[in-house]
Image (spheres, rainbow, N blue to C red):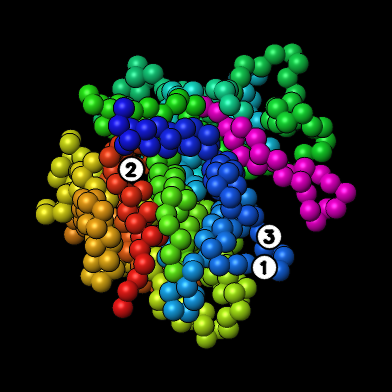
Amino acid sequence: MGKEQEFAKKLIDFINASHSSFHATKNVEEILIKEGFKKIELQDKWKLSKEGKYYVSKNSSAIVAFVIGKGEIEDDGFRIVGAHTDSPTFRIKPDPEMTVEGEYLKLNTEVYGGPILNTWFDRPLSMAGRVSIKTKNPLKPKELLIDMEKPIMTIPNLAIHMNRKVNEGVKINPQIDTLPLLSTINDKFEKESFILGLIAEKLNIKLEDILDFELFLYGVEKGSLIGLNEEFISIGRLDDLAMVHAGLYGLIDSKVGNATNVLVCFDNEEVGSTTKQGAASPMLRTVLERIAISMGKDKEDYYRALSNSFLISADMAHALHPNYTEKQDLTNRPVINGGPTIKISANQSYTTDSSSSAVYEGICKSVNVPVQKFVNRSDERGGSTIGPISSTQLDIPSVDIGNPILGMHSIRELGGVFDHYYVYKSFQEFYSIIATN
C-alpha cells in the first residue's frame, strides 16, 4: 500500500469517528494535544510565545489551531487554511417522537443544509451530537457528546408498486417523506421520554438532568477505498472533513517559519455561516487580533499583519461526472485524482483572483502537485463557501480551492485518494515557505 492510500485510510478513520461537528472538533483537538498543542480559553488572558503551539475552540463545534512564527507578526503575517466541520444532514427536533396508528414510532426531524434527500432512504442510520446537562449553575450547563454508534433507525422508501413514477423523479417532502422509523411499539412504550431515555441510558445519567440536545442523523456504513486500484474514497462528509483533515496534518507536519500558521475550522457553513462559530462571525478576526496583542503588538501592527497574510479557503469542488459531462464548463473540467482545484467565479461566489490563484498554483508546482481549475457553466448557478464570507470579516488576500468529488452532499460522496494527499502536501508547503522580498 502506497503512502497515498495510507493517508486516505487515516482520513476514513477520522471521518468514521466524526459523526457530528462536535465530534469532528473533539477529534481535531485530541490530535492537536498529542502533537503538543496547548489549549487556551477565550475567557483567559493569553500569554503566548514564539514557536508556541496553541488552539482554542468555540461552541465545541469550531476550532482554531495556530503555531506562532519566528518572525514579527506585522512583517510576516498569518498563513491561514480555512475549512468547516459541518455537513448536510437531518437534525432531530424537540419532542420528536411520533406514533403511527399505535404501531410504529418515528422521529420528527428537519433538514440541515442541502442534502441529496433520496440518498438517505433505506440506509441504516444512527444519531450523534451534544447533550446539555443540568448543573448547580444554570448559566453553565454541562455538555456531553453522544454517539449511538449503532443503526437504530431508517427512512424507508415507498414501494415502486405504490409509487409507479418513482424512477421518473418524484418530489420529496422533508416533513412527510424523510422522517426516520425508529421502532415498533410495545406495551412499555412511553412516548414522552423515549429519546431522552435512550440518551440517559447511553450516557449513564439521570433522565431528569437532561436539559436539551442537538442530535443529527448519520449513515453508519463505514467508508472504504474502492476502484480497481483503490484510487477512490467512498464515504460521507468528505465535504468538508477531508479539508479539515488535510489542513490539520499540513499544520502539524510543517516547519515553523517566520509567519504564524493558522488552521481554522468553522461550523455552520452548510446553513450560511451566520453563527457565533461560523465564518461570518468575528471568531477568526478576534483570535488573530488577540494573538497580535499577546505578542506585544498594537492595533497598527495587527493591521499591518493582515496586509502580509494569506488565506486558503479549502472546501470541496465538483469533478467532471462521467454520466453528466454536459453539466461541466466547456473548457474547465477537473477530474478526480487530477489534483486540487482552484475555484473561480466572476460574480465573486469564490474569492479567487488572478493574483491569489497564482500564489496557490505556485505553491503546488513547487512540490510537484498538479492543479486544476473549476468555473461553473455560465447557465448554471453554483454554490459558495467560507472564502467570500470570511472576506466580510478580514480583508486578507484569499483563494478558494478544493478537491474534486462526485455526489457532493450525498450521504456518501466519492473523492480521490491521490487528491487528498496532493492537497495535504500543498498545505504543508504553504505553512513551511519562508518568504523572501
Image position of 33 with respect to 309: above or below: above
Q: What residue type is labelled 3?
A: Glu
The one of 172 and 148 positioned closer to us in this rendering: 148
143 in magenta: yes
Mark positioned earlier in the residue sequence (3 or 1):
3
Image position of 39 with respect to 118: above or below: below
Q: Which amino acid does label 1 sit on?
A: Trp
Task: Look at mark 3 in the image and give the residue it sits on.
Answer: 41
Q: Where does the magenta region start and end?
A: 125-147
Nearer to us: label 3 or label 1: 1
Q: What residue type is labelled 2?
A: His
Task: Look at mark 1 in the image and give the residue it sits on.
Answer: 46
Quadrant in the rendering for residue 126: top right
Residue 77 coordinates in the image, percent (x, y): 45, 73
Disc count in the image?
Answer: 3
246 in magenta: no
Asked whether disc 1 touches disc 2, contact meaning CB atoms under 8 Å apart, the reply is: no
The one of 180 and 244 positioned closer to us in this rendering: 244
Q: Which mark is residue 420?
A: 2
Residue at the (58%, 44%) spot, across then down: 34
Quadrant in the rendering for residue 43: bottom right
Residue 300 coordinates in the image, percent (x, y): 52, 86
Q: How crowded is mark 3: few (under 14 residues within 10 Å), some or many (20 or more)?
A: few
Secondary structure beneath dot 1 equals loop
